[in-house]
């Protein structure tokens, strides 16, 4: 939501359009009925961007019944594309944008547009007062409890495992449940997935057990406090116990907050995810078990705030090591830890420019392989100090 909205702010600016406060997706896996103002501070959003783009809360009544253009803007498009799209104003007064994800290019945009995207994302899109208030309280409670903590985005959830086709370590019944869910989810286009191929390619989220071995190998002691930023873990406590056996100080928002505090957010996955976002931004270390939308957005926000430490697991490399552990070719200990630490010495959020497209890929397909602007808004949105590397 955050990155899609920020893209549409920039697109509205380019097309000299008024932006109507977005309607949020209510049909996804989470079935969340939250509105924009339930999640974000609407007035703050409008006023913060008032010098960049005119924003209104709703479509004016005189425009509600007139014909409108329904447009799927092309992914990763540049300035020229949207200047061309401005021709729609000749025939229409309203353009309904059906999708907002990744509609703007990551690179080769004017500096003022890139900075507007950051202004929208990091300044204007403040969470609603109720979310901000509870999020800050939970961070304070974590700090008072242990001082420092790791925020672990443990994306070991039913929808992610089903979507990616990752069944390593699951029972036959669990694997079948995930397959049926994938078959029945119409907007997931890929139905037949080779789980082993996915895992070896590094496309699967790390399991709770694998995360435990990973953090232990990086040198974190068993007393480390780990906040679990996620929804319901697939397999529940039984599967989470594989992480707890190494790191018993596992904390969730349900443990930090009272039932009364969480009651207003019940059945609103986007709002509880916003709490996780706040706690992840403020953590001493952020570790995502999979590189999904939230993980990329949190990493980029932490970079914007001063390149706070984010450890990105090399899932493909780790799977090779984990398989050697399983076969007995490697054993846990100092040698294994050295291999893991060497693999990740340059994956901890230090300043660097965005990665471009993978070599050998031509045409528009190459754009899909670029590092997201919102994952690493350096250097456009991050000023370098004299001592910066």
Image: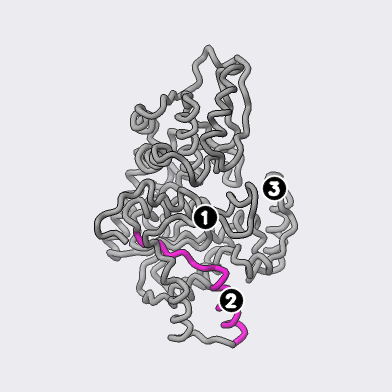
Q: Position of residue 64 (x, y in %)?
A: 56, 17
The nearer-to-camera label among 3 and 2 is 2
Please tell me which residue is depicted at 72% across the width and 64% down the height of the picture.
Answer: 194
Q: Which mark is residue 356?
A: 1
Whether residues under marks 1 and 2 lie with C-beta atoms below 8 angstroms apart, the answer is no
| Label 3 secondary element | loop
Image-quadrant location for residue 142: bottom left
Query: In front: 280, or 101?
Result: 101
Q: Is residue 230 above or below residue 27?
A: below
Instruction: Mark 3 or mark 2: name the one nearer the start of the chain.
Output: 3
Q: Badge 3 local density, few (<14 within 10 Å), some, or many (20+)?
A: some
The residue located at (58%, 58%) in the rendering is 358
Q: Residues within 10 Å of mark 1 (few under 14, many from 20)?
A: some
Q: Residue furthest left?
A: 386
- Residue 296 visible from this viewpoint: yes
Residue drawn at (28%, 55%) of the image: 140
How far is the residue under mark 1 from the one under mark 2?
26 Å
For disc 2, the marked residue is: 320
Q: Main secondary structure of the magenta part?
A: helix
Q: Which residues are magenta?
A: 308-328
* Residue 238 shown left or right of residue 46 in the figure: right
- Residue 317 falls in image quadrant: bottom right
* Marked residue nearer the N-terminal end (3 or 1): 3
- Please tell me how crowded label 2 is: few (under 14), some (14-19), or many (20+) other residues with Cα within 10 Å: some
On residue 232, the disc is: none
Classify mark 2: helix, strand or loop.
Answer: helix
Q: Residue at x 68, y 65 (%)?
A: 195
| Residue 60, above or below 165 | above
**Label of residue 185 in the image:** 3
């Amino acid at each position: 939501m955050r990155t899609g909205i920020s893209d549409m702010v920039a697109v509205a600016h380019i097309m000299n359009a008024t932006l109507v406060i977005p309607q949020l997706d209510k049909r996804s896996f989470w079935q969340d009925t939250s509105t924009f103002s339930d999640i974000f501070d609407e007035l703050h959003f409008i006023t913060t961007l008032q010098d960049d783009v005119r924003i209104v809360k709703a479509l004016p009544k005189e425009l509600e019944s007139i014909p409108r253009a329904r447009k799927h803007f092309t992914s990763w498009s540049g300035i020229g594309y949207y200047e061309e799209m401005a021709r729609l104003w000749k025939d229409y007064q309203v353009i309904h944008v059906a999708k907002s994800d990744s509609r703007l290019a990551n690179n080769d945009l004017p500096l003022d547009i890139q900075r507007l995207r950051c202004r929208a994302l990091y300044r204007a899109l403040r969470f609603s007062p109720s979310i901000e208030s509870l999020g800050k309280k939970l961070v304070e409670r974590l700090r008072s409890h242990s001082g420092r903590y790791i925020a672990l985005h443990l994306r070991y959830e039913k929808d992610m495992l089903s979507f990616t086709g990752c069944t390593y370590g699951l029972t036959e019944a669990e694997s079948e449940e995930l397959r049926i869910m994938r078959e029945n989810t119409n907007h997931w286009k890929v139905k037949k997935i080779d789980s082993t191929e996915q895992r070896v390619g590094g496309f699967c989220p790390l399991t709770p057990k694998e995360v435990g071995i990973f953090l232990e190998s990086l040198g974190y002691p068993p007393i480390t406090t780990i906040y679990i930023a996620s929804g319901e873990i697939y397999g529940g406590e039984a599967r989470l116990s594989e992480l707890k056996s190494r790191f018993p100080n596992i904390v969730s928002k349900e443990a930090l907050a009272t039932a009364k505090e969480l009651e207003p957010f019940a059945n609103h996955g986007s709002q509880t995810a916003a709490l996780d976002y706040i706690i992840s931004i403020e953590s001493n270390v952020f570790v995502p078990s999979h590189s999904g939308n939230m993980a990329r957005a949190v990493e980029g926000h932490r970079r914007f705030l001063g390149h706070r430490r984010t450890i990105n697991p090399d899932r493909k490399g780790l799977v090779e090591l984990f398989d050697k552990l399983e076969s007995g070719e490697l054993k846990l200990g100092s040698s294994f830890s050295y291999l893991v630490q060497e693999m990740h010495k340059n994956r901890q959020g230090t300043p660097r420019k965005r990665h471009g497209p993978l070599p050998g890929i031509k045409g528009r397909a190459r754009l899909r392989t670029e590092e997201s602007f919102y994952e690493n808004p350096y250097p456009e949105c991050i000023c370098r100090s004299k001592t910066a590397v």
